Image (spheres, rainbow, N blue to C red):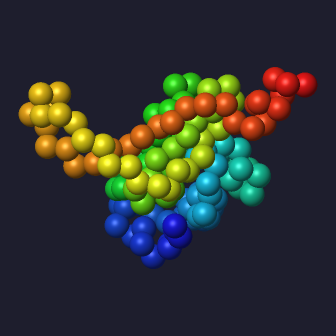
């Protein structure tokens, strides 16, 4: 997934150096960062960067389908710049999120759909990552 700068002209805001730095940080990022993570990383280069700029940029990207908001971490919003259909596995301890690129077909019996036309799904697997398992052994 590449963030091409020219693809963001339709977002309705000026592409400032700070916003471009946010896009650069997200480009190829597989860490599923929170707004706080993006802010800390981009602020190193732009000390005058405000958290509001980061948060508002991420929200606008989300509204325009350029990033996905993940719900697997109840403590903070996390964002995924990979908008291609995929699933995630989330560590129950450290909240690390990893992509699961495999597609799974799940059917929902009509009596449980409540009249919904299902257009997709997002599966979040949970478990304990290797680092957390290693820490619990030692």
Q: Position of residue 103 (x, y in %)?
A: 41, 54
The residue shown at (37%, 61%) is: 11
Q: How many marks?
A: 0
Q: Position of residue 54 (x, y in %)?
A: 56, 47
Say above or below: 63 vs 74: below
Relative placement, left or right, of 57 versus 135 is left
The residue shown at (22%, 49%) is: 119
Residue at the outermost bottom position: 6
Say above or below: 124 vs 79: above
Relative placement, left or right, of 125 versus 22 is left
Residue at the outermost right position: 138
> Is residue 32 visible in this depiction of the protein?
yes
Residue at the outermost left position: 115
Residue 33 falls in image quadrant: top right
Foreground: 73 or 127? Answer: 127
Relative placement, left or right, of 9 versus 52 is left
Foreground: 37 or 57? Answer: 37
> Is residue 52 visible in this depiction of the protein?
no
Q: Position of residue 45 (x, y in %)?
A: 75, 57
Which of the image's four quarters has the C terminus?
Answer: top right
The residue shown at (69%, 36%) is: 129
Relative placement, left or right, of 57 versus 128 is left
The residue shown at (38%, 43%) is: 122
Q: Position of residue 32 (x, y in %)?
A: 58, 46
């Amino acid at each position: 997934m590449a963030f091409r700068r020219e693809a963001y002209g339709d977002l309705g805001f000026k592409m400032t150096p700070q916003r471009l730095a946010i896009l650069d940080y997200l480009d190829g990022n597989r860490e599923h960062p929170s707004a706080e993570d993006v802010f800390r990383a981009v602020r190193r280069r732009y000390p005058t960067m405000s958290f509001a700029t980061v948060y508002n940029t991420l929200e606008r990207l989300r509204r325009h389908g350029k990033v996905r908001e993940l719900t697997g971490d109840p403590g903070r919003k996390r964002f995924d710049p990979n908008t291609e259909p995929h699933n995630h596995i989330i560590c129950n301890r450290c909240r690390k999120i990893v992509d699961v690129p495999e597609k799974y077909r799940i059917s929902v019996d009509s009596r449980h759909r409540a009249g919904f036309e299902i257009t997709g799904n997002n599966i979040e697997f949970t478990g304990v990552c290797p680092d957390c398992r290693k820490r619990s052994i030692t």
